Amino acid sequence: IPVDGVVERGIAMVDQKMLTGESRPVRKEKGSDVLAGTALVDGKLYVVATAVADATRAGWIIRALDEVPAQDTRAAAYANRVADGLVGPTFALAGLSLLVSGSLRGAASILIVDFATGIRLSAPTTIMATLTRAAADGVLIKSGRALEQLAAVDAILFDKTGTLTLGDPAVSDVRTLNGYSEEEILGLAAAAEIRLRHPAARALVRHTPGARGSWSRPGSHFPPMATSTTCVASRNRSRGSPRTVARSASSRIAIRHDPRPATSSTGCAEAASRRSGLRQGTRR
């Protein structure tokens, strides 16, 4: 998404981890705000731009990083004091060299070798390089002093667990109902997800052997953040969350369920599958 703006129409899943650190895609629909630098995972959006280029949130972050005070640290202050303290001894050594050798060139050579500048630049250069590397890894540090204070930190409190995840889910368990095998359930689920780019869809396809086959047919329906429905072996196959799948008038054939809250037990999400037969004469 190249601009900050407001969604005029459309529904889509947007990956905002570059700005928020949250790896889970977020649903965007009419009236939702979108930010430059975020990525469209699935769906289509028509956006009215409210800010472009440097005026976007991403542009503000870039400017803030460019203006980070790298010299506002104890290390930089100490380096400046050491450099200031070397000025007098350097002139004294140059004068002594002139008296002993009588050579202006020798005295000038001592003055040219500027130890102080290297010492002054070492601390801010190191800090700026560290801040830049951290930003490249998705960690934004507001100042050199904040970076320096990390050395004394022995505990960190995170307000969002999403900032600690990789955003790369995997299938952990499959439980079947009504006599269906695990292989058949995975095959049907992957057939409904093969064309989607949502992280959960990619996880199902990766987990299913032979998932790159041509299961899904033209006319398959893939609404963002709902169920995905496709035609396999003359039947409709749907895959989605238990709540969305339960709304369809079809027979449940598989579900992964844990009565405990997922976030407090294993961190697993639930997915359900249904199937329904096509009525005679129905065209897809």
Image: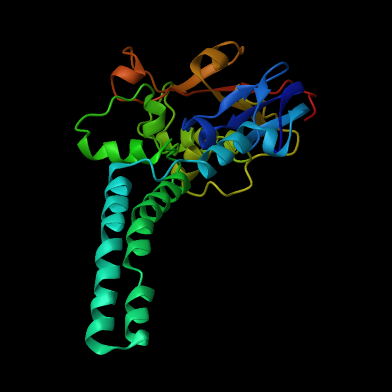
Q: Could you tell me which quadrant the C terminus lies in? A: top right
Q: Is residue 82 left or right of residue 63?
A: left
Residue 160 visible to an observer of this rendering: yes
Number of numbered tags placed on the structure image: 0
Q: Is residue 152 positioned above or below 126 on the image?
A: above
Residue 211 location (% of width, % of height): 53, 46
Q: Is residue 153 positioned above or below 251 on the image?
A: below
Q: Is residue 256 positioned above or below 170 on the image?
A: above
Front residue (pair 159, 80): 80
Residue at image location 77% in from the left, 28% down from the top: 49
Residue at image location 36% in from the left, 21% down from the top: 159
Residue 34 location (% of width, % of height): 66, 27
Residue 23 location (% of width, % of height): 47, 33
Q: Could you tell me which quadrant the N terminus lies in? A: top right
Front residue (pair 172, 60): 60
Colour pattern of the rendering: rainbow
Q: Is residue 147 left or right of residue 19?
A: left
Q: Quadrant of residue 171?
A: top left
Residue 72 location (% of width, % of height): 37, 40
Front residue (pair 69, 134): 69
